[in-house]
Image (cartoon, rainbow, N blue to C red):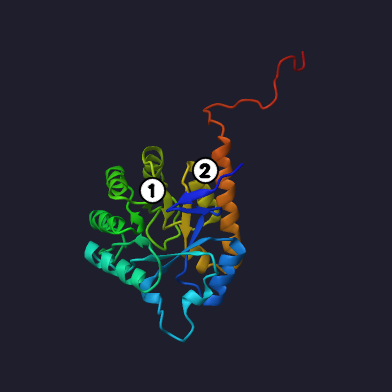
């Protein structure tokens, strides 16, 4: 069965997306991408120097992998739009993850400014994937603004706490007609599988992989978990029940 993921005009076979920050070396990041089969990675503009002759993160993104710049560091829509335009002008392409964060303690996204940035950049031909605090009304506005997907957080960035917003994410999956990609907070492959079992289109992971004891092995584990979770969703999990039910019929037993 063909279960390719269509996103922004691209076809992805791997539903694990990878952030490139926090790896101890670019070579380790490259190996994690290659071994896990990741096809889309996100890179903060401040980590890209197109003119540098020194070791550059872009040199370690395998050919054929989609590069999605993100607007990390933007505090409002105006700054996010400026970062995205600079990245595209510098050669990073037209894929952009919108991050607008003015909260420096919990690093929660500003949904209102994110909507504004999404509308502007989608109007300029960008493939826009906005990172947001899960809220149905906001997700609908992002979809109307031209978002290619909506990326709700599972938990605050970098916490590895898992799907603390699970109930809200499920509402978005059920009600929004663009892909829902769970981003931020996923700390274990089992949590990624859970998100996929819910019906998420993909997950984006960084900290849990980059800071693991063996990042390459962890990337492979996450890729396997995402695939398993997707297969479970497509197979239609059995309903839960309040009382026990024997798996074998008891009719005629010990008459």
Q: Is residue 126 left or right of residue 239?
A: left
Q: In what element is the residue under mark 1?
A: loop
| x then y, percent, for residue 159 | 42, 61
Of circles 1 and 2, the one toward us is 2
Report the residue that reaches farthest toward the right: 254
Side of 227 where 97 appears, left or right? left
Picture disc at residue 197: 2
**Residue 214 appears in view:** no
In front of the other: 61 or 113: 61
SS class, disc 2: helix
| Quarter of the picture holding the C terminus | top right
Mark yes or no: residue 184 visible: yes
The residue shown at (59%, 61%) is: 36
Residue 3 drawn at (x, y percent): 56, 45
N-terminal of the pair, mark 1 or mark 2, is 1
* Distance between mark 1 and mark 2 Cα atoms: 15 Å
Residue assigned mark 1: 165
């Amino acid at each position: 069965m063909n279960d390719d993921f269509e996103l922004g005009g691209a076809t992805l076979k791997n539903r694990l997306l990878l952030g490139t920050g926090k790896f101890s070396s670019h070579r380790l990041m490259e190996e994690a991408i290659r071994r896990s089969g990741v096809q889309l990675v996100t890179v903060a503009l401040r980590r890209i120097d197109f003119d540098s002759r020194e070791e550059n993160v872009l040199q370690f993104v395998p050919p054929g992998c989609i590069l999605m710049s993100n607007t990390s560091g933007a505090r409002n829509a105006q700054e996010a739009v400026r970062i995205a335009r600079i990245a595209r002008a510098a050669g990073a392409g037209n894929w952009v993850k919108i991050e607008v964060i003015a909260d420096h303690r919990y690093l929660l996204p500003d949904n209102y400014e994110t909507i504004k940035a999404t509308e502007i950049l989608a109007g300029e031909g960008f493939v826009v994937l906005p990172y947001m605090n899960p809220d149905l009304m906001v997700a609908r506005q992002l979809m109307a603004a031209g978002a290619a997907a909506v990326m709700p957080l599972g938990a605050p960035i970098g916490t590895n706490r898992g799907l603390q917003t699970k109930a809200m994410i499920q509402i978005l999956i059920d009600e929004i007609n663009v892909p829902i990609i769970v981003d931020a907070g996923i700390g274990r492959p089992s949590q990624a599988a859970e998100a996929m079992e819910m019906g998420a289109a993909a997950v984006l992971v960084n900290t849990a992989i980059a800071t693991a004891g063996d990042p390459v092995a962890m990337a492979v584990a996450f890729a396997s978990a995402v695939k398993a979770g997707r297969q479970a969703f497509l197979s239609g999990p059995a309903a839960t029940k309040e009382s026990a039910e024997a798996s074998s019929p008891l009719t005629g037993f010990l008459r």
